[in-house]
Image (cartoon, helix red, strand yellow):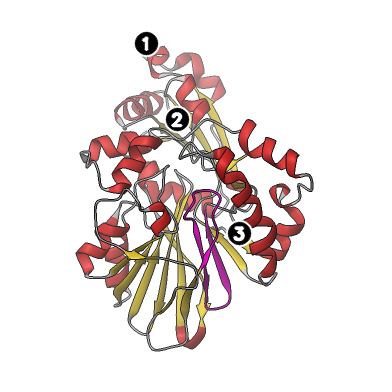
Amino acid sequence: MSVQQWSAADVAKKVINNEELFILDVRNVDAFEDWKIDGHKFEYLNIPYFELLDGVEGILAKIPTDKEVLVVCAKEGSSMMVADMLAEAGLKAAYLAGGMKTWSEYLEPIKVGDLTGGGELYQFVRLGKGCLSYMVISEGEAAIIDAVRFTEVFLNFASEKNVKIKHVFDTHLHADHISGGRHIAAATGATYYLPPKDAEEVVYDYEPLVDGTTVQIGASNIDVGAIYSPGHTIGSTSFVVDSKYLLTGDILFIDSIGRPDLAGLAEDWVEDLRETLYKRYRELSDDLVVLPAHFMIIDELNEDGTVGKRLGELFAENHGLNIEDEGTFRSIVTDKLPPQPNAYQEIRQVNMGKITPAQDEQTEMEIGPNRCAVR
């Protein structure tokens, strides 16, 4: 049997198309339990590589012969060797090129919908990290919101669409991933916007993003309108795009709400969070489609792979929007939080422009699942 090499894009298609896949993950148990490749119909077997050094005979009975089998490790080498052993034993197996490192970095661009006058809105889904970035396109111009650090993906996509990137926004100073926003702006001549209340320590130039800011994209009436919505950070800002979509950053997710503690000010910001979720957002139209900057679990993906849901539905279904008692709300968002993101303090320093780690260091800083939400 020959061994196949699968790209992260190949695996992403399995996730988005809701296909079956059996994954043999040969990383250590703690790494697997902390973070794995999630799929709606995926099955898993976690056997650390060092337990397979003498061969795979002992696990053959646990591996199906009627399903595609993908071997996964941290950076590729171990999974390639185990896939070879499975092939020698007569099984059809593949390995993930680049391992979990590559999976963490892959972005899948998916069209969310059409906008006024022939415009389009795209969501860039980072399946391995739960990050969601956006590109608004209209009449040869584009705006990008919450770009991750893989700037070439956005530059190449804009080139394919034959549009010029004119505006780049970050909804807040991110703490779980490194932003590519100001780097895209530098490469294209676009204007980079950041909420000033999150930018007090940044060491680069930016355009202040304040409540009521409206930026027109193209010559049509598509606009990206800003709404001050603190709580995850003191500067967090949401956007209403074309009166149809509400981009909520890390304040409101499909299945949860944003955590207020990543700058060490949970007690100070919890009231801001509640006011944003229970007052500011309540004044908006229920028909707006919420598009967050992250997703937490694979079940939040729609059938087409996008992440988004009507605001009215979230008011009815999202538990974080239905906690009547303020004391209970405070307790949930300050006392019962999941572990903080990997290297989040250092990531904030990078996004302030204070440190510039090498690419390998940046990869290590971002490794792991999304942890921006209250669970």
Give the residue displayed 45% in from the left and 35% down from the top: 341
Q: Position of residue 158 (x, y in %)?
A: 31, 70
Q: Are marks 2 and 1 in contact (CB under 8 Å)?
A: no
From which residue to which does the magenta span run?
227-249
Q: Secondary structure at mark 3?
A: loop
Closer to the eye: label 3 or 1: 3
As rendered, which of 12 and 201 lies closer to the eye? 201
As rendered, which of 330 and 244 lies closer to the eye? 330
The CA span between labels 2 and 3 is: 31 Å
Q: Secondary structure at mark 2?
A: loop
As rendered, which of 280 and 63 lies closer to the eye? 280
* Residue 104 covered by magenta stretch: no
Mark 2 and mark 3 lie on one chain; the one further toward the N terminus is: 2
Residue, disc 3: 303
Task: Judge the density around disc 1: few (<14), some (14-19), many (≥20) Cα neighbours within 10 Å.
Answer: few
Closer to the eye: label 2 or 1: 1
Determine whether, in the image, residue 204 is placed left or right of residue 56. Answer: left
Among the 4 quarters of the image, the one containing residue 27: top left
User: Is residue 281 shown to the viewer in this render?
Assistant: yes
Residue, disc 2: 91
* Residue 243 covered by magenta stretch: yes
Q: Residue furthest top?
A: 54
